[in-house]
Image: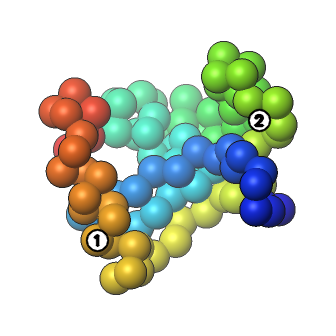
Amino acid sequence: MWSAGAASFALVFVDPAADAVRTGREAARELCDRAGMPVLVGDVVGDNYESPADAVRTATGVDRNPDPYHGVHSLTPDAREPADRLLEKATSWQRMT
C-alpha cells in the first residue's frame, strides 16, 4: 500500500466523459481499445499487465513494483475539478477523444 513519502506507481486513466477512473489492468484494456487494437490484444495486455508495467517501471527508473490497483471506479465530484484542470493543460496530442 501507499505510504507518505513513498512514490506510488500505478497506471491510471481518467475518463471524465464516462465519469470513470480506470486503474491497472482495466486502464491498459481501455487504452488498447481506444487505440483500435483487437479485443484479444486488450485482453492479453490486461491479463499480463505486470509485464508491460515492469517495462515501464524499468524505463522510468522506478525501483518498486506497481501498486495493485485494478478496476473501474467512479470519478467523484471532488476529483472532477482537478481532472478537468489537468485536461485543460494537456496539449492536443496528449488528449484522447
Disc 1 marks a residue whose amino acid type is: Glu
- Disc 1 secondary structure class: helix
Q: Is residue 73 above or below residue 21?
A: below
x then y, percent, for residue 95: 24, 39
Mark 2 Cα-neighbour bin, 10 Å: few <14, some 14–19, many ≥20: some
Q: Nearer the viewer, residue 19 or 10?
A: 10
| Residue 95 relative to residue 13: left or right | left
Question: Which residue is the extreme one toward the top?
Answer: 59
Disc 2 marks a residue whose amino acid type is: Glu
- Disc 2 secondary structure class: helix
Question: Which residue corresponds to the image point at 61% horizontal and 63% vertical from the top-left?
Answer: 71
Q: Is residue 49 above or below residue 26?
A: above
x then y, percent, for residue 38: 44, 31
| Residue 65 relative to residue 39: left or right | right
Question: Which residue is the extreme one toward the bottom?
Answer: 77
Q: Nearer the viewer, residue 96 or 89?
A: 89
Q: Let me know if residue 25 appears in the view.
A: no
Question: Which residue corresponds to the image point at 70% horizontal and 58% vertical from the top-left?
Answer: 69
Q: Is residue 96 above or below residue 84?
A: above
Q: Nearer the viewer, residue 24 or 64?
A: 64
Residue of label 1: 81
